[in-house]
Image (spheres, rainbow, N blue to C red):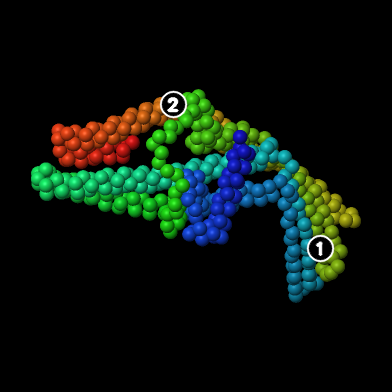
Amino acid sequence: MIFPKILNLKFIFISYLFLIFLCKVFPQNHFEAITFKDAAMLAVSASDDLKNEYAMRAIREGTWVLGRRVYFPKLTFNMSEDDRLSTIGADSFLKTYSLNVDQLFWDGGRTSAARAIEKEELSLQGAELERMVIEVADIALAAYRNVLSARTQLSIREDSLNSLKEQQRILVQEVALGLALNLDLVEAEITVAEAEIEILSLQIDLEEAEQQFAEVLGLDFLPALAEKVDIYRSPVLPSVSAAQATAESRYPELIIARHSIAKKQVETKYAKQTWLPTLRLNGGMSFSGNQYPLTKSSWTVGIVVDFFSPYLSGNVNGSYGWEPPYDKTARVQNSMSPLPDPAAALTPRSAELALSWEKTKYDNAIRQVRRTTRMAIEKCQLLERKRILAIEAMNLASEQIKLTELRLQLGQLTRIDLIEAYIVYAQKEVST
């Protein structure tokens, strides 16, 4: 589960760098009409927060890779010159060159567990980064929809205003011929003025929405939009079970929760391994003398065993050496410390409780996601019914306009009634 997510994150990162390259190669005025997908990708590439997080992510991953150095021998080179001038006795000029090697041989898996925890932290940060990408993309899609909605509403209101002005023009002629009252003309003029004020307000809202959308995309201007509002298009909804399965596999919070559980599992394993001893091999060789070439040499090889538990800790250190041609050395050193940290005995239990709590939170989150998904599907079905009813209401309003025109010709209604019918139709169209 972890490696596919890492590969997916790397793919997103490569796509992000490619988008930056395209933005630098092609000027902004070369953008064609953008779709929802284009808007989401542009917003992701323009986000300063994501740029910083991607850079930090690359540094953390590089740090983890370079951390493999812990498995290799540690080499130490020492060079020293000790000059002593004596008023009584001979002077000495001691030169020493030494090389020491320390190699971790076995530590009960603690080093591997520590690196596994770091890896899970990287995966957790990657999941957080994916959630940030989704949030930025959602903001761009919401801004895209706001612009489409504002443009559609403005277009509907402008068409309605044209119809109202046409009725006003006819009403002026009817007043001149004595077929209508001046009071009706005044009322029509007020209605037209209110419609013009509403259009100005919609134009301001549209400009603000377009500006915000361009800022989200990181552009100086808003390119053409390829998507259109289609009130007659019916969405294809998945089944509740299919939607729940998709949500469980892709919902960012659940992905983060799964990585948290994996991290806690490794931490629990690590806590249970702390009592195991560690085994290190070390050795060294040195060359010394009063002048070059150095004539004295020596070497040592040893083993160090460290152990720790809440009730007893210490180490055993043994070494063997040789100083050619005659001298040999051997050393054994032991140290013990009783009851170094009795409270540490509760650490594994604490880690197990933390793991159990993460699993409980994950189970609760699963149930919440399933309920939310089921409610979302049901809400979409209700909205689909609402859309169909709104279209029917709009069609009825259109028929009402035709009937009002007929009754106006028969002298049963005034032109003000027809103007009100146009206003009702525009309201129904906007609500659809």
Mark 1 residue crowding within 10 angstroms, few (<14) / some (14–19) / many (20+):
many
Q: Residue at x 20, y 41 (%)?
A: 419
Provide the residue designation for mark 2.
374
Callouts 2 and 1 close, C-beta under 8 Å: no
**Nearer-the-camera pick, 349 or 94:** 349
**Height in image: 296 above or below 134?**
below
**Height in image: 349 above or below 22?**
above
Q: What is the quadrant of residue 422 in the picture?
A: top left
Q: Residue 339: x and y, percent? A: 59, 35
Residue type at mark 1: give it. Ser
User: Relative to residue 119, is residue 369 drawn left or right?
Assistant: left
* SS for callout 1: strand
Q: Residue at x 77, y 57 (%)?
A: 99
Q: Residue at x 63, y 39 (%)?
A: 3
Q: Residue 24: x and y, percent? A: 54, 60
Provide the residue designation for mark 1.
288
Residue 362 seen in this snapshot: no
State which mark lies toward you, 2 or 1. Answer: 2
Looking at the rendering, in which quadrant would you find the C terminus? top left
